[in-house]
Amino acid sequence: MTENSPATENTKTVLTGLQPTGVLTIGNYIGAIRNMLEYQKEHKCYYFVADLHSLTVDIEPAVLRKNTLDVYALLLAFGVNPEKSTFFVQSHVSAHAELTWILNCHTQFGEAKRMTQFKDKSKKSPQNVNVGLFDYPVLMAADILLYQPDYVPVGKDQNQHLEIARTIAERFNNKYSPTFTVPEGINPKYGAKVASLSDPTAKMSKSDENKNGSIFLLDTKDEIMRKFKRAVTDSGNEIVYNQTEKPGISNLLTIYSCLSGKSVKEAEKEFSGSSYAQFKDAVGQTVCDFLLPVQQEYARICKEKDYLSSLMRNGAEEAARTAYRTLSKVYRKVGLLSR
Ligand code: TYM
């Protein structure tokens, strides 16, 4: 796992996806979307909404449909540019599901069982430990390996899934012959794990039942200000970055720094002498100012249903060309007869 964008002179292939299980959070923005926008400037990028992954949790069909459109539109509003990047919905390219089967047969049960996200999610929803949840990392490996990316920008919570994708790719390449690029995961230097505002030791998550811990990208100004006001802070009264002693304040400093473009050091200086309440208010205000234009653009895009559908269709067609090239190579190598 590498931190931040490695400097390269040549164009690389970059891929990442986001699940439409709920409304995206500023954790998703800081951990992944920021890097997506950066990479898009110079590299060949594949970005997608991972709707198949969302079926591993109990989700109403109407909610899944709405969330998928919302995530797609929000990413456009942030600046994902379909003229530069191949931008699509995962289930529109059936090669993802097809490669998953082949990779399932090259993944050990024990490897999948070790995934901490599987263990955590099983504990959280013991009534729905479905086989899809167990197979989630293999579907993710298929998402990645179909497009031969060099880099996969993700937050820290996805690092273990990235590792298993690399293991599967290496195993396949060694067993047959070089087929897959072995990708490198990229975490942002700051904000690879934005914490919940209610519990600074836990990840901010779009599926958290406690909605006060997460800032959703479509929250209103009042909701955002209220959540920051209630954010859990630490003992003492100094605004300094110290992950172990002051996880709450450090989290707020990270959010402030990532959205204001100022360094953490600059932020510490700016708020030296301020009270926690003043600081939380300033962070809330910065988040609101940052999100407002994105939310306006999102609202505008959402009205253009036909435009959205045509972008999705074009994106899927473009993605499918690359995906099926890899898939047919894989089918041939494992010994499946061609049609
Ligand atoms: P998902 O939808 O949970 O999150 C999308 C991206 O946001 C990052 N992220 C965070 N980063 C920092 N702090 C947080 N609190 C935070 N919460 C989420 C995630 O690490 C991720 O980069 N399985 C993936 C989606 C996926 C995927 C892929 C990603 C499916 N196939 C292939 C990369 C490549 C997921 O559930 O992300």
Image (cartoon, rainbow, N blue to C red):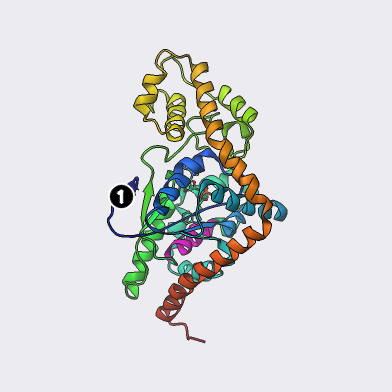
Residue type at tag 1: Pro
Q: Residues within 10 Å of mark 1 (few under 14, many from 20)?
A: few
* Residue 218 rendering spot, x and y as whole percentages: 62, 39
Residue tagged 1: 6
Residue visible at 37% across and 55% down in the picture: 42
Nearer to me, 339 or 300:
300
Residue 258, percent from left and from top? 43, 35
Q: Which residue is nearer to you in this view: 185 or 313?
A: 313
The verdict on residue 142 being magenta is yes
Magenta stretch: dominant secondary structure:
helix
Vertically, is 224 above or below 96? above
Q: Tell me if residue 240 can be seen.
A: no
Residue range highlighted in magenta? 134-145
Q: Is residue 91 left or right of residue 327?
A: right
Quarter occupied by residue 192: top left
Residue at left offset 58%, top offset 61%: 311
Quadrant of the rendered image containing residue 146 = bottom left
Q: Position of residue 22 (x, y in %)?
A: 62, 46
Query: Does the magenta segment cover residue 223?
Result: no
